Image (cartoon, rainbow, N blue to C red):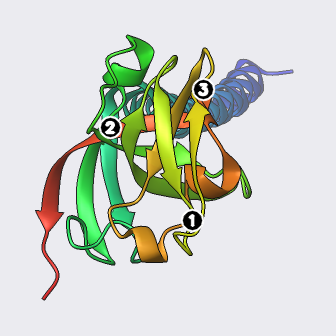
């Protein structure tokens, strides 16, 4: 073979090698870009999920242990709290046994645990309560046992309360109302 043919073959091989190397680099660059974009999207997605879980936990703890906004429904607390009034309830009092006579509290209903009731604390554990039945024919004394409270609505003629289901376990109290936001009328 002549020198010129060898030179041409060498040049051709060099060009093929150059094209192959560039294609590999181009493919590697594309794969690198694809991996970087995928990492970015996955990273942002996982960060968003992490923040959502984190803030969800913070909100749950705030509503469970600090307090929240509630809407009271029903006529049992009229005229103090009207139907559909919005109130702030704090939950710290129940955790530190700070509930006192006269406080308006939110509690789980003893007859329907899925619903809440809004009532006034009339008696604490150890108190002797004079109860009136709705017909006012019978007056009797009830004692509030340890770990319980006696709850009644302000509208006695239209309230289902401790006069019907007896003393409420302290553990059913969810919070104490301290501020009424929205007034009916």
Pointer 1: what residue?
160
What SS does tag 1 mark? loop
Mark 2: give few (<14), some (14-19) or many (20+) Cα within 10 Å.
Answer: many
Separation of marks 3 and 1 at Cα, in angstroms: 19 Å
Question: Closer to the camera: disc 3 or disc 1?
Answer: 1
Separation of marks 2 and 1 at Cα, in angstroms: 19 Å
User: Does 153 sit left or right of 31 as displayed?
Assistant: left
What SS does tag 2 mark? strand
Pointer 2: what residue?
176
Q: Residue at x 26, y 75 (%)?
A: 82
Q: Earlier in the sequence, mark 3 or mark 1?
A: 1
Residue sitting nearer the eye, 111 or 20: 111
Pointer 3: what residue?
171
Picture coordinates of residue 152, whole percent (x, y): 44, 53
Q: Residue at x 71, y 31 (%)?
A: 20
Mark 1: give few (<14), some (14-19) or many (20+) Cα within 10 Å.
Answer: some
What SS does tag 3 mark? helix
Q: Is residue 109 above or below residue 134?
A: above
User: Does 173 sit left or right of 110 as displayed?
Assistant: left
Question: Closer to the camera: disc 2 or disc 1?
Answer: 1
Picture coordinates of residue 54, whole percent (x, y): 46, 26
User: Does 131 sit left or right of 90 as displayed?
Assistant: right
Asked which quadrant contains residue 182, the reply is bottom left
Q: Is residue 56 visible?
A: no
User: Does 67 sit left or right of 181 as displayed?
Assistant: right
């Amino acid at each position: 073979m002549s020198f010129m043919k060898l030179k041409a073959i060498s040049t051709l091989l060099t060009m093929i090698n150059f094209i192959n190397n560039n294609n590999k680099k181009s493919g590697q660059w594309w794969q690198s870009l694809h991996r970087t974009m995928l990492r970015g999207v996955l990273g942002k997605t996982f960060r968003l999920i992490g923040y959502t879980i984190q803030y969800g936990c913070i909100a749950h703890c705030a509503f469970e242990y600090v307090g929240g906004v509630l809407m009271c429904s029903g006529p049992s607390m009229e005229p103090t709290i009207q139907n559909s009034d919005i109130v702030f309830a704090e939950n710290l009092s129940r955790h530190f046994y700070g509930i006192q006579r006269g406080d308006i509290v939110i509690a789980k209903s003893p007859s329907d645990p899925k619903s809440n009731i809004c009532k006034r604390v009339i008696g604490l554990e150890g108190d002797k309560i004079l109860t009136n039945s709705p017909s006012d024919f019978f007056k009797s004394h009830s004692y509030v046992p340890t770990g319980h409270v006696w709850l009644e609505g302000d509208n006695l003629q239209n309230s289902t309360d401790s006069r019907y289901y007896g003393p409420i376990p302290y553990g059913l109290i969810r919070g104490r109302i301290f501020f009424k936001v929205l007034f009916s009328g």
